[in-house]
Image: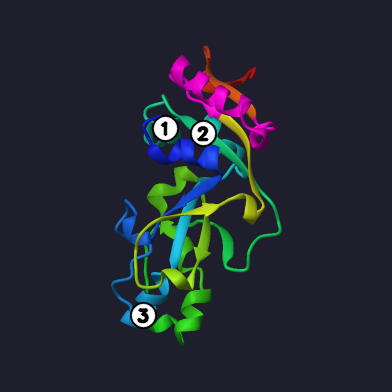
Amino acid sequence: LSNQYTLSEIIDGYLFCVHPVNYNDPFDCPLDPYPDSYKKIASGVRVCSFSSSSDDRLSPEKNVLMWSHYAENHTGICIEYEIGANRMDNFAMYQVQYRDEMSFRRDRYRDEMSFRRDRFFELKNYDWKYENECRIIHWDQNNIGNEKPYNLEVRKNNIRIKSIIFGLKCSETNISTIKNLIKNSNALDDISLYKMKKSCPKTKFTLEKVDI
């Protein structure tokens, strides 16, 4: 578990949120065509990305590419969150919409408010469809003018960890670390643990329950 934010998300109950300028795709939420006033509004936005389980074919535990690209070649973990209906006013959640061609026009918005309300932050190139991504969009006017990431406290936003899935190659040391964290925390006592297993001869994964 080399990612410094992973354990913090579990122990402290935070989601790590980033500004779109830090995305690994330069065509994701491109702000270049827009005037400075619009960019200023966007600077107050932070995004946390998830892989949705709404499509069973692309569910995280069955998605080999997701484990390979985002879980350190199957050695990491997948955290499953349950997100309730009642959340803060400056908080939204969108399923990402994938497009073959990304086209953004600066004359699309009548004013700055229409830009803020638009789903500008949920469009992505079709090449990324395998992620089946959904995004938490958090807007905070106190962060206008900077692009630094920050942590969003999940308990105040009706979000909880439902389960943790260990990758196929996750070490026993890391599994024990997570199990001990859960044992020693009253706030984490309702989390289920699973381990990825190969389903032979079929080339797919199955989940095996892990006792705490």
Q: As shown in the figure, which amino acid type bears the numbered disc 3?
A: Arg
Residue stretch rendered in magenta on the structure = 165-191
Earlier in the chain: of badge 1 and badge 3, it is 1
**Could you say which disc has been placed on residue 106 in the image?**
3
The residue tagged with tag 2: helix, strand or loop?
A: strand
Residue contact between numbered discs 1 and 2, judged by CB atoms under 8 Å: yes
Q: Please tell me which residue lies in front, 187 or 128.
A: 187
Could you tell whether 87 is left or right of 147 in the image? Answer: right
> On residue 71, which mark appears?
1
Answer whether labels 3 and 2 touch (C-beta < 8 Å): no
Find residue 78 and name its label. Answer: 2
Q: Earlier in the sequence, mark 1 or mark 2?
A: 1
Q: CA distance from mark 1 to mark 3?
A: 37 Å
Q: Nearer the viewer, residue 168 or 125?
A: 168
Quadrant of residue 85 in the image? bottom right
Colour scheme of the picture:
rainbow
Question: Vertical placement of 3 versus 34: above or below?
Answer: above
Whether residue 35 appears in this view of the structure is no
Toward the bottom, the furthest residue is 110
Distance (Cα) linking label 1 and label 2:
7 Å
Question: Which secondary structure, mark 3?
Answer: helix
Amino acid type, residue under disc 2 in the picture: Cys
Residue 184 lies within the magenta run: yes
- Amino acid at dot 1: Ala
- Residue 106 % position (x, y): 36, 80
Q: Which quadrant of the rendered structure holds the C terminus?
A: top right
Task: Assess disc 2: are there few (<14), some (14-19) or many (≥20) residues with their C-alpha within 10 Å of its C-alpha.
Answer: many
Q: Position of residue 82 (x, y in %)?
A: 65, 44
- Give the residue drawn at x 35%, y 60%: 148
Q: Position of residue 206 (x, y in %)?
A: 58, 21
